[in-house]
Amino acid sequence: MSRLPRTYDPPVKLTPKQANIYVWGFQPEARFRDAVCGRRFGKTFLGKAEMRRAARLAAEWGVSVEDEIWYGAPTFKQAKRVFWRRLKQAIPEAWRATRPNETECSITLKSGHVMRVVGLDNYDNLRGSGLFFVLVDEWADCPWEAWEEVLRPMLSTCQYTIPSGESRKGGHALRIGTPKGFNHCYDTFQDGRPGHEPDHKSWLYTSLDGGNVPAEELDAARRKMDPRTFRQEYEASFENYAGVVYYTFNRNESRTSERIKPGEALHIGMDFNVMKMSAVVYVVRDGLPLALDEFHAVRDTPEMIEKIKARFPGHSVAVYPDASGQNTSSKNASESDISLLRKAGFSVIVDSVNPSVKDRVNSLNAILLNTYGERRLKVNIDQCPQLTLCLERQTYTDKGEPDKDPKKGHDHMNDAAGYFIVKRFPITQHTATVQSLRI
């Protein structure tokens, strides 16, 4: 391995906000950086500077040539279109061992290190090498599994020694992009906030902060775009994505700090699933519901009963269950499930069949926000973190149905929440069969 030759190619010029992200690179306290930025912030210029520095440091710090340097985007086609030409511009010819490989979009350096442009949609095909540095662009549109299953493990094996003699382990990453709802981009941004993960750092900058978009251009965009899209695209604001099922939920405006009071009657929406039982605990005050607690990923009905009794002694409980879910002892929402709840002393309020998905979704959306601007359902997001996450993230499939992808798991908690709402606060009236009503 050899150092890269000195070059007098002009360096990439960064704006102050871009430079603020750049200077934290390759620091132990900012090993994983997340930059949430508005459109036209200048991510490409920052990316060129980051990749150029990574190439130089890999040679200077004795990083193994098995640990590569990548730029990743949601698809290979997008990665090639956006960055391949720019990567070739960023890496001086004097640093290259051979001509760039136009088919694989890779550059081999004289130090022996390899730089690549990759797509993260077919992430299983990327396994194999280690990573010294990865720049992930349009992070909100990339699959989380690509990071969790491939990129993060590949960064773990990297080892090197900095000029001071200090040995370090683990590669570095910069994830950058514009928000798209409250998905994994939001999660990793939160990891970098003060007091959260010690080796993460994050920033949020608007398009105007980037210094590349004049104020008058932003004014023109504001006149032509709806407020939510403008906030998301230009102000880097985390907004409910347009394709989410429960688009009326807003964690700030739907928030309550209310807690369950001693002896208060509880109304629990419940979804039966093997190893994934979910329940949302409501109270009704002044005729309106408050979602104040939850149960997530419970094994089965007996365990759910045990947890409810342990957490809420002295409360009367009415359960509004899934009429066709599953548990470990039956294939359909069986009489045994219902009888177990009833034998536990709970009231069970259930129809013979579940309401239509459309009715349940519409009822929950309407009580979260109606056409008069009233938010009649409030959620304690601190006590109900899974419900909050699922309301923000469940989207529609290409067929126009709520996504029930088990890898995402955003449906169970929402279903549980909806069973109570559609029975007690329906848009169209339904007649419920009340079994052993005690409340």
Image: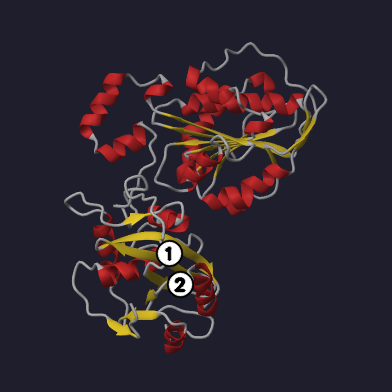
Q: Which residue is mark 2?
A: 314
Q: Which residue is mark 1?
A: 262
What is the secondary structure assignment of the residue under circle 1?
loop
Q: Secondary structure at mark 2?
A: loop
* Location of residue 398 in the rendering, given as x and y in whole percent from the top left corner: 35, 59
| Left or right position of 169 against 366 | right
Tell me which amino acid carries mark 1: Pro
2 and 1 marks in contact (CB < 8 Å): yes
Residue 171 place in picture, x, y as percent? 69, 37
The spot of residue 420 in percent (x, y) is 33, 70
Q: Nearer the viewer, residue 135 or 277?
A: 277
Residue 401 visible in the shown view: no
Q: Give the vertical position of 60 relative to 251 (above or below).
A: above
**Apparent side of residue 329 relative to residue 280 in the rendered image (left or right):** right
428 or 410, which lies in front?
428
Q: Quadrant of the C terminus?
A: bottom left
The alpha-carbon separation of the residues under discs 2 and 1 comes to 8 Å
Q: Is residue 307 left or right of residue 243?
A: right
User: From what the image shows, is residue 171 above or below residue 372?
Assistant: above
From this view, report whether residue 19 is shown above or below residue 365. Answer: above
Position in image of residue 7 (x %, y %): 66, 13
Outermost left residue: 372
Q: How is the image coloured?
A: secondary structure
Circle 2: residue type: Gly
Query: In front: 383, or 206?
Result: 383
Q: Which residue is at a point 51% across and 70% down the rendered structure image?
A: 276
Within 10 Å of disc 2 (Cα), the crowding (few <14, some 14-19, many 20+) is few
